[in-house]
Amino acid sequence: MQLTRILQPLERAEFQVEGQFVYLRSATAPVDVNINDQAAITLGQYDQLHDTHIKRLVVTNTSSSLNPVVLEMGYGQFVPAKNGHVAITNFPTLQTVSVNNWPSQQTVSVSNWKSVQAVKQSGDWQVSVSNQPPRPSAMNSGQITIASGAGSLSANTKRITLIIKAGASNSQAVSIGSYPLEKGEVITLSNPAELALTGTDGDQVFYLEETQA
């Protein structure tokens, strides 16, 4: 399941969801994430949270600028995030454990974890990752202005996600094929094909394109 939202400065957005992990696929600034009315956790791009059953998700933009956010949710085995980030699991209360001078390549088994476990690690960890979502290599943005009743965005076989927003000052709806996009409306696509637009000359759409290597 994928959630896509362009958050306004300091906006707080609430979602009813189902899953066991939350993965921040992309964002231009950190966000505060609150699951099941528990304590808020700040996530950066590629960070993840894990809990036994996530039903309610609240995401808050910490930035004073627009923040296009793409979140992934699902069930099953937790996949570690990049750069040695650690999953935070089952955190109904706030108890902090600090672990320092941890030797590299050490395996630690933890059972009966009852509260928040905040881990500080020194030394290097070697992590083997399988079934990890594709890493984006770029976030490209731009705008398309309708001319002679049409506009287009070229096909891109490396495209992961394409967010399209109709200009707020457009005079009429801009159509993607037969689908009308009203002014200010946002749509998310996962299609590498060329995007063909029709509409009134001078009207615009804005896009944010996530691609992979």
Image (cartoon, rainbow, N blue to C red):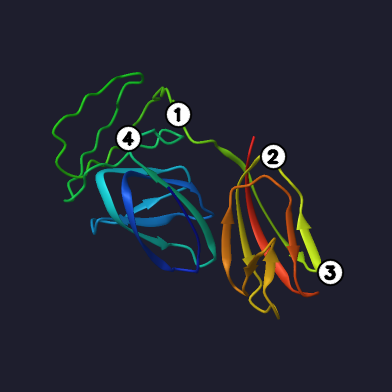
For disc 4, the neighbor class at 10 Å (few under 14, some 14 to 19, many from 20) is few
Residue matched to label 3: 147
Quarter of image, res 23: top left
Q: Nearer the viewer, mark 3 or mark 1?
A: 3
Q: Where residue 107 appears, x then y in whole percent?
A: 28, 20
**Distance between the Cα atoms at labels 3 and 1?**
44 Å
Residue shown at 30%/19% (left/top)?
106
On screen, residue 200 versus residue 111, left or right, reads right
Residue matched to label 2: 157
**Distance between the Cα atoms at labels 3 and 4?**
48 Å
For disc 3, the neighbor class at 10 Å (few under 14, some 14 to 19, many from 20) is some
What amino acid type should be assigned to the residue bearing mark 4? Gly
Query: First in sequence: mark 2 or mark 4?
Result: 4
Residue shown at 25%/41% (left/top)?
89
What amino acid type should be assigned to the residue bearing mark 2? Thr
Q: Specify the label residue 76 is tagged with.
A: 4
Q: Label 4's element?
A: loop
Query: First in sequence: mark 2 or mark 3?
Result: 3
Query: First in sequence: mark 3 or mark 4?
Result: 4
Q: Quadrant of the C terminus?
A: top right
Quarter of image, res 195: bottom right
**Distance between the Cα atoms at labels 1 and 4?**
11 Å
